[in-house]
Image (cartoon, grey):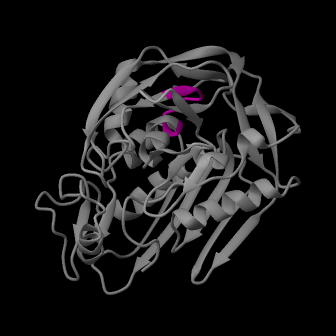
């Protein structure tokens, strides 16, 4: 849905699945939210809520955990955030009745289907973006990531490489629109190697992980009998994670994100570096409805609502 105005959902919609780590059933309901409210997670039954921004991240081992002064509230939020940002939703509430967002099939497609069912509506306020004004780079060992200016909206260029694995080296470039996210990214599933999953099982984690919600490889081959949804599904899922990771900026980004051998820790570090440099970004507003692009800019007065943040893969190391 193209719009120069902010958007939210028309109605509430609920999906049900299991938590990838707990294996417990979870109900998640996505619904409308007010102008300029962004994405808010609500734990039903606990009378607690948390904003989906970096300052709410309380842990990042194995998955993103959002919380508040009382402690953790909800984890594994990356795929639903990617679906909302990818489909052009600006404001939404996300209610969950358990400690994890359900993993569903390991992709964002079930959340996209839920958004379609709820419907997207315009709101009476201009859409806001964070525009990258100069390059910001982070190096972590053999991994490299950067955000740099890009006038065409948001673009991701990723390379991954897994040694001694059938995953191998994959590269993918992607310009984000609702249509391209739906067609090229949202169905890509989380992935891992059997040895990593087995270690997590033995430690009491990833109890809900299975071939029904993950692409799994051993040292020689793919273990999923149905095969891949895309020939390069692994790198496309990394792009999906980037869209979800960077949703914790608080507003959509206008810029190019590039990473080599990256993952959630690197995504977080690059976003944090961007937000820490007040000369590297500004908030802009879309003011011409026909163009659906930001044309009027203003400096942000603060960045509490657009602080950098991260989400983490359900299991497995960032780099192999």
Q: Nearer the viewer, residue 106 or 225?
A: 106
- Residue 258 placement (x, y as % from top left): 61, 64
Location of residue 258 with respect to 70 vertically, above or below: below
Location of residue 77 with respect to 296 vertically, above or below: below
Q: Residue at x 34, y 57 (%)?
A: 190
Residue furthest left in the image: 225
Residue furthest front in the image: 70
Q: Residue at x 35, y 28 (%)?
A: 114
User: Is 315 one of the magenta-colored residues?
Assistant: no
Residues rendered magenta in the picture:
85-93
Left or right of residue 284, residue 86 in this image? left
Q: Residue at x 49, y 35 (%)?
A: 84
Residue 175 in sight from this viewpoint: no
- Residue 293 placement (x, y as % from top left): 70, 32
Residue furthest bottom in the image: 164
Location of residue 236 with respect to 19 vertically, above or below: below
Image quadrant where residue 274 sits: bottom right
Q: Nearer the viewer, residue 218 or 19?
A: 19
User: Is 89 one of the magenta-colored residues?
Assistant: yes
Location of residue 145 with respect to 214 vertically, above or below: below
Image quadrant where residue 191 sits: bottom left
Left or right of residue 147, residue 44 in this image? left
- Residue 302 placement (x, y as % from top left): 85, 40
Q: How many numbered circles are shown?
A: 0
Residue 140 in sight from this viewpoint: yes
- Residue 240 placement (x, y as % from top left): 45, 52
Left or right of residue 280, residue 43 in this image? left
User: Image quadrant for the C terminus?
Assistant: bottom left
Image quadrant where residue 301 sits: top right
């Amino acid at each position: 849905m193209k719009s120069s105005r902010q958007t939210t959902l028309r109605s509430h919609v609920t999906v049900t699945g299991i938590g990838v780590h707990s294996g417990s059933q979870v109900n998640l309901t996505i619904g409308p939210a007010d102008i300029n409210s962004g994405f808010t997670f609500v734990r039903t039954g606990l009378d607690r809520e948390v904003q989906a921004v970096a300052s709410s991240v309380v842990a990042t081992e194995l998955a993103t955990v959002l919380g508040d002064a009382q402690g953790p509230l909800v984890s594994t939020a990356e795929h639903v955030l990617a679906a909302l940002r990818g489909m052009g939703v600006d404001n939404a509430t996300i209610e969950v009745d358990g400690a994890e967002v359900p993993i569903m099939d390991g992709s964002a497609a079930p959340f996209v289907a839920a958004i379609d069912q709820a419907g997207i509506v315009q709101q009476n306020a201009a859409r806001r973006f964070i525009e990258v004004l100069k390059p910001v780079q982070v190096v972590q060992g053999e991994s490299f990531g950067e955000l740099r200016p890009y006038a065409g909206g948001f673009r991701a260029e990723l390379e991954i490489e897994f040694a001694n694995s059938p995953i191998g080296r994959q590269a993918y470039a992607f310009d984000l629109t609702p249509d391209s996210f739906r067609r090229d990214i949202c169905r890509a599933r989380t992935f891992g190697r059997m040895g990593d999953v087995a270690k997590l099982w033995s430690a009491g984690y990833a109890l809900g992980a299975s071939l029904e919600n993950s692409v799994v490889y051993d040292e020689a081959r793919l273990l999923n009998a149905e095969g891949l949804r895309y020939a390069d599904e692994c790198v496309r899922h990394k792009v999906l994670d980037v869209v979800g990771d960077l949703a914790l900026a608080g507003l959509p980004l206008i810029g190019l994100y590039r990473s080599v051998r990256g993952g959630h820790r690197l995504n977080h570090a690059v976003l944090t570096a961007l937000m820490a440099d007040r000369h590297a970004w500004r908030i802009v507003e879309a003011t011409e409805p026909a163009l659906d692009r930001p044309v009027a800019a203003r400096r942000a007065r603060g960045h509490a609502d657009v602080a950098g943040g991260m989400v983490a893969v359900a299991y497995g190391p960032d780099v192999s």
